[in-house]
């Protein structure tokens, strides 16, 4: 049995001050992270203060856009079409929530290599998703 | 300073309804308050502290204190999702120990069944949330936030769907004796696995019920508890925390119970092997397996083996759990199961559980709750109680 990816309506992100840069970069096909200039740690989701050392010397850096599947679940009921939610461990070491797209969901495995792919939300925001690398 | 022995649970009441379309949420809160006050043998005027959480109209104490016309000297509307009420017992015990109040009322009520709530719905969580832009486009819902945890648990520890199903089977064995339970039919592992897949690897029967109703408990200082005619249920130890995504270092292999369990056991001066009965939050079958491990009832990763083969069934299993049928079969009012966890533990300690599920010589019980979702952010609270 296969569960192919189908396009679905994605909610727009409700941006707070400080979020725009992430989604502007996504529109250019870039996945961004915040990196601390004091302790050197990446973090996600992006914040104005480093969640590890509380330094305000945090800056946007472009992630490689590759990683591995940490976990996933195919939600088969409740929506108009099945979708696959999960977390990816980025090569930079942090994990981010995402959806897996452009593949047969039934073939997804924990540990599998994936790369970023962008899908548009209802209002036209670019949302980082992942697909088998 | 410890709260050990400084407070007692003197009243407990679970609303009998599971569908209440003609009652307001405020009415349900007031009805469970009345039930718990009468169970204790107190009057409304004895209440001098009130605790409620996000299920209360207005999400704080104002409207319900007004509705019930309470005169208070201590209030607390801490919201930790479904485990809020365990946190409230802890806070009430702390306030009583500090002399801030004598008799604390804690209520929970809601109508998600009548309102058509489902664990597959995307819920609006409010405004100004810093995490929401990075999550909501992906449609996290209650069931997939737990399913991702179950999937990872299977990967790391070899846990199976059959093992998870045993949690539901045990709950159903208990629910058959509860006339108010939503699901009273005993189910088999095969029936759980044959139920529709909602979000891999969780089937419909891995999920708790959606019910209206509610419950309330009363916490009082020792002098008052000893003046009443009810069996004495003493608060021995408590723990509370929240676990989250740790700046991007997400680790779904354990829950906040790993931190709250040891705190509560240390304060109580007992160990997991001493516990005769445990109320374990059962929003999903995986929730139970995770908490049993983190509380120390078995080694990490061995929860699946531990719950298999009926080991949670009262009378035959090693750890009788959720003898009311739990959230999986009996009741999950307001989508928050912490209150009913306390209430069934109190019934067990009083010797007032159904005769078919009553644990013999039940003098030490644990209740543990998980609020929010294990897959991103959750509250965790542990409560250890003793029959005096």
Image: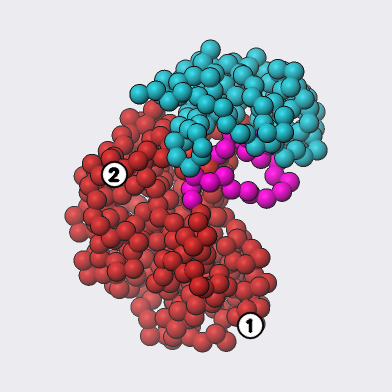
Chain colours: A cyan, B red
The chain holding disc 2 is B
> In the image, A97: left or right of B290?
right
Decide if residue B230 is in sight here. Answer: yes
Quadrant including the N terminus of chain A:
top left
Tell me: residue B204, above or below residue A66: below
Number of other residues with Cα within 10 Å of mark 2, as a class: few under 14, some 14 to 19, many 20 or more:
many
Q: For numbered disc 1, what is the local secondary structure?
A: loop
> Nearest the camera: B243 or A110?
A110
> Nearest the camera: B62 or B275?
B62
Give percent across and percent down for residue A51.
69, 35
Tell me: residue B162, above or below residue B169: above
The chain holding disc 1 is B
Give percent across and percent down for residue B102.
56, 79
Tell me: residue A56, above or below residue B27: above
Where is mark 1, residue-wise? Answer: B69
Q: Residue at x 25, y 57 (%)?
A: B185
> In the image, B177: left or right of B59?
left
Where is mark 2, residue-wise? Answer: B192
Tell me: residue B274, above or below residue B132: below
Question: What number is the disc on residue B366?
Answer: none
> In the image, B347: left or right of B64?
left
Q: Residue at x 33, y 64 (%)?
A: B181
Q: For numbered disc 2, what is the local secondary structure?
A: helix
Magenta stretch: residue B127 in it?
yes
Q: Which residues are magenta?
A: B118-140
Quarter of the image for residue A56 reads top right
């Amino acid at each position: 049995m296969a569960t192919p990816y189908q396009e679905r309506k994605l909610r727009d992100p409700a941006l707070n001050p400080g979020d725009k840069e992430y989604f502007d970069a996504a529109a250019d096909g870039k996945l961004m992270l915040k990196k601390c200039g004091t302790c050197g740690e990446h973090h996600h989701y992006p914040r104005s203060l480093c969640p590890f050392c509380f330094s305000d010397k945090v800056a946007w850096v472009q992630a490689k856009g590759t990683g591995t599947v940490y976990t996933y679940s195919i939600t088969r009921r409740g929506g108009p079409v099945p979708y696959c939610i999960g977390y990816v461990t980025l090569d930079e070491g942090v994990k981010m929530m995402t959806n897996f797209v452009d593949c047969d969901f039934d073939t997804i495995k924990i540990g599998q290599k994936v790369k970023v792919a962008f899908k548009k939300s209802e209002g036209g925001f670019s949302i980082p998703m992942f697909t088998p690398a | 300073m410890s709260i050990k022995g400084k407070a007692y649970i003197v009243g407990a009441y679970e609303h009998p309804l599971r569908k209440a379309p003609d009652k307001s949420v405020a009415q349900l809160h007031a009805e469970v308050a009345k039930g718990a006050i009468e169970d204790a043998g107190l009057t409304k005027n004895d209440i001098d502290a009130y605790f409620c959480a996000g299920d209360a109209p207005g999400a704080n104490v104002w409207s319900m204190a007004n509705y019930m016309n309470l005169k208070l000297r201590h209030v607390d509307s801490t919201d930790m999702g479904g485990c809020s009420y365990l946190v409230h017992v802890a806070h009430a015990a702390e306030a009583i120990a500090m002399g801030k109040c004598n008799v604390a009322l804690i209520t929970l009520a809601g109508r998600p069944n009548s309102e058509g709530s489902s664990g597959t719905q995307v819920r609006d969580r409010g405004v100004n949330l810093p995490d929401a832009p990075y999550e909501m486009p992906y449609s996290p819902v209650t069931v997939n936030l737990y399913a991702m945890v179950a999937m990872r648990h299977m990967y790391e520890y070899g846990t199976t769907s059959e093992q998870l199903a045993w949690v539901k089977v045990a709950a159903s064995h208990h629910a058959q004796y509860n006339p108010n339970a939503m699901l009273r039919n005993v189910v088999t592992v095969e029936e759980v696995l044959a139920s529709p897949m909602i979000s891999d690897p969780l089937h419909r029967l891995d999920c708790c019920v959606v019910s209206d109703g509610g419950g309330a408990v009363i916490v009082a200082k020792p002098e008052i508890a000893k003046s009443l005619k009810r069996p004495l249920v003493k608060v021995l130890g408590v723990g509370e925390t929240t676990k989250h995504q740790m700046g991007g270092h997400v680790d779904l292999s354990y829950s906040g119970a790993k931190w709250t369990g040891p705190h509560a056991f240390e304060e109580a001066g007992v160990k997991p092997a001493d516990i005769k009965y445990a109320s374990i939050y059962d929003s999903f079958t995986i929730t139970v397996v995770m908490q049993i491990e983190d509380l120390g009832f078995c080694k990490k990763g061995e929860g699946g083996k531990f719950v298999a083969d009926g080991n949670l069934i009262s009378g035959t299993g090693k750890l009788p759990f959720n003898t009311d049928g739990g959230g999986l079969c009996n009741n999950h009012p307001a989508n928050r199961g912490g209150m009913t966890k306390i209430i069934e533990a109190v019934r067990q300690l009083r010797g007032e559980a159904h005769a078919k599920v009553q644990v013999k010589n039940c003098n030490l019980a644990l209740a543990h709750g998980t609020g929010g979702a294990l897959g991103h952010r959750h509250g965790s609270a542990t409560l250890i109680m003793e029959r005096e």
